[in-house]
Image (tube, coloured by chain):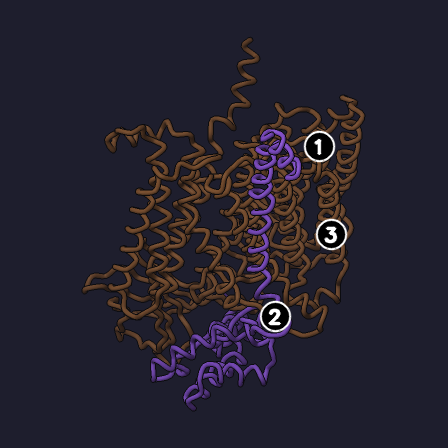
Chain colours: A brown, B purple
Amino acid sequence: MIIEIAHFSLILTFMISLVQSTVPLFGAQKNWVNWMRLADKTALIQFVLTCFGFGVLIHAFSVSDFSVKLVALNSHSLKPLIYKITGTWGNHEGSMLLWILIINLYGFLIVLFGKKLPLGLRCRVLSVQGVISAAFLGFLLFTSNPFSRELYPPANGNGLNPVLQDLGLAFHPPFLYLGYVGLSVTFSFAMAALIQGKIDAAWARWVRPWAVSAWVFLTIGISLGSYWAYYELGWGGWWFWDPVENASFMPWLVATALLHSAIVVEKRNTLKSWTILLAILAFSFSLIGTFIVRSGVLTSVHSFASDPTRGIYLLIIVFMFILCSLTLYAVRFSSIKSINQFTFLSRESGLVMNNLLLSASAVIVFVGTLWPLLIETLLSEKMSVGAPFFNIAFTPFMVLLGLLLPVGALLPWRKSKIKRLKPSLLAIGIFSVVSGSVVWSLQTGTRILGPVGVSLSIWIILGSLFDVSKNSTIANGKFLRRYFRLNNLPRYELGKSFAHIGFGLMIFGISAVSAWEVEDIRIVHLNEPYQVRGYTFELIAVSEFPVSNYITRRGSLLVKKDERTLATLLPEKRYYPVQATTTTEASINSNIFRDIYVVLGDRNSENSWVVRTYIKPFILWIWIGAFCIAIGGVVSLSDRRYRMASSYSNKLVKL
Amino acid sequence: MNLLNKFILLFCMLLFSSGFAFSVQPDEILLDSALEKRARAISLELRCLVCRNENIDSSDAELARDLRLLVRERLTFGESDEEVISYIRERYGDYVLLKPSFSGASIILWVIAPISFFMGLLLIYLTLFRSQKVRNEIDLSNSLTKQEQIDIKKLLDD
């Protein structure tokens, strides 16, 4: 019964979203305040109703109600409760419902935080959100209803893909969706601005927090996914340029460009039409990403063709949104006027370069991801575009971005007085090149990647630190005093440096692990120690035993260095009888200098097994860097100027 | 635990311990470490044809193992990296290459991003900086054409 009520509540939400997408918009054109005010209420009701629908679905999963088709197909009564719950969005229908929940959450947040927005802008933004919500609710209800019943409920469910039974993966999609869908808010703001034909610095100030928070979520979501791939897939890679990964990476690249160009609009009131275009593109890439992941078009063109309803519907949504928004943009393009008053050496042009490089790298990812599909459709030839292509084509742009970053971040607005910065930049540059050469002379082998990566990351990190210290001190100041001045530094500046340092750390981690990783594959006998780069490993036991819904084979390895035991690693291989699949659980001993990564392979003879051992130097810095980038966004969000809205309204009350 | 359950468990264990090949196996590794290194590098560029976006180096499929062995066999014959790759490409088609060759339609794939980057640079120069310069010049010359300027000069000189 409650399932049917939830189904009904979704239908109701669909109806309300149709109202929200038309009435306030029309009201805004006619300036009918009552019609405009409706948007707030509909957004609120939509949010409450989808919360209810999603809650019911979670409940159905957690009590294993197999009369619901979705639960029967994707859950199993033996599964631990936490994975029953997270299994709610581990399937197509549930994850689409999560998507809709989040878009309505954002609608609610716009109402909550947007009290100070001009009514016309707010109701137009909410209207566009209503259109998006309606499109996806329609998709859910007509092609992928999560609440379909099973006429003859099975005794037990079909289980869940064992790979998905993992906390990292369980929380990867919600973050990713918070990011994807968060970009809908900037999109709606861009649309509203185009409709009303007014874009100014205030608009950018309203948009930026939304862009930044969506971007933070996307950053967290992508890094969670990457860390999950690292420890779960069993050969220690952390990024595979898989279409599904690329689908989340494209919006990230464009969103990064967007939040940089929005700074220019906010501070200098220029680059407006470009920023609007980026806002449109960022969400378009989110939609394309959703299409790629949800239609299954890239995993297999044939499975797409055999059941095309969902794919076609999604394709139509994506196509319509992109077409309509770009048309509106083209129509209004000439009315968006910016006065460009900046010289070649200015922060504006630094940010323009940032935008250009990020867009070009987004082009690579986009074209590379869709190329096989395009070739197969046009020439009916099969071809692959994989990691080796992306590594070659993508890296130069990132290196260029890294080289320009400290310079661009240090340049003043409008006109440069580079003379004062020149000596410090030169010093940092020389220092980073020298450290790179030192690393080069220390390393064995001749690969240039490691030293170059070290130089580049030192260049970025020192450049950003110099930026902070320059801003935090007025001419004199001892170190401690400078430190205290950090508190007076605008949070926005601090966040910027955090994120830039994070980027530097990430480059360091990536190049270090790519250059200096050691791999060892061998047959290991029980109690016969072996050595890999100074570490001694000894397999002391291998045991097999059943755990809740799987059977595991677990090896115990002692890791020693200089006769001192560092850790006992417990790599596992798990067998899930319900799904008849095997998963590999690598065992990792992590610290900031290296990861020791061990995978247990097949049994070779009575007491010997294949064991794969990796020493991965500095790999943790990839995720520490990503974390710093996200923290940078959060710090920047806490900037006083973005909180001013609330304090301002408090003052009004006092008056 | 009753007998049936025990039996099922035993059966599962048997299934479990039977061959589950996992990427490069110790018996595949060449003794010559320089050759092995080259084999690994080549393996990273070849697609496991039955997998989803996986190279043969990390794949557990039987076919991937066969290809790995083939790569090593060709290398021990003394073939160069290019010869090995083109040998495999001839047999399995372009689909096997994870890095498309710089030929045919793939040229577009390779050059599209660099070209869009340079076009972007040009566009930026034209819209942001040159228009500005032109504007400044117009401001300076007070929107007079060359002929008018010459005329004025003449008048002033006279």
| Residue B130 figure quarter | top right
Name the chain letter of the residue that bears numbered label 2.
B
Residue at x-position 71% and y-position 64%: A304
Query: Mark 3 or mark 1, which is nearer to you?
Result: 1
Q: Is residue A152 visible?
A: no
Left or right: A216 as drawn, with respect to A196: left
Name the chain letter of the residue that bears numbered label 1.
A
Q: Amino acid at mark 2?
A: Ser
For label 2, the SS is: helix
Above or below residue A118? Residue A290 is: below
Alpha carbons under labels 2 and 1: distance apart:
42 Å
Which residue lies under the disc numbered 1? A197
Q: Work out whether residue A6 or residue A584 is closer to the camera in this orientation and state it.
A: A584
Residue at x-position 40% and y-position 41%: A498
Residue at x-position 75% and y-position 27%: A38
Q: Work out whether residue A399 or residue B46 is closer to the camera in this orientation and state it.
A: A399
Alpha carbons under labels 3 and 1: distance apart:
24 Å
Which residue lies under the disc numbered 3? A319
| Position in image of residue A590 (x %, y %) | 34, 56
Name the chain letter of the residue that bears numbered label 3.
A
Location of the N terminus of chain A (image quadrant): top right
- Residue at far bottom of view: B77
Which residue lies under the disc numbered 2? B106
| Position in image of residue A599 (x %, y %) | 40, 68
Q: Work out whether residue A345 or residue A399 is closer to the camera in this orientation and state it.
A: A345
Q: Is residue A422 visible?
A: yes
| Position in image of residue A125 (x %, y %) | 68, 33
| Position in image of residue A100 (x %, y %) | 67, 43
Q: Amino acid at mark 3?
A: Phe
Q: Which mark is residue A559?
A: none
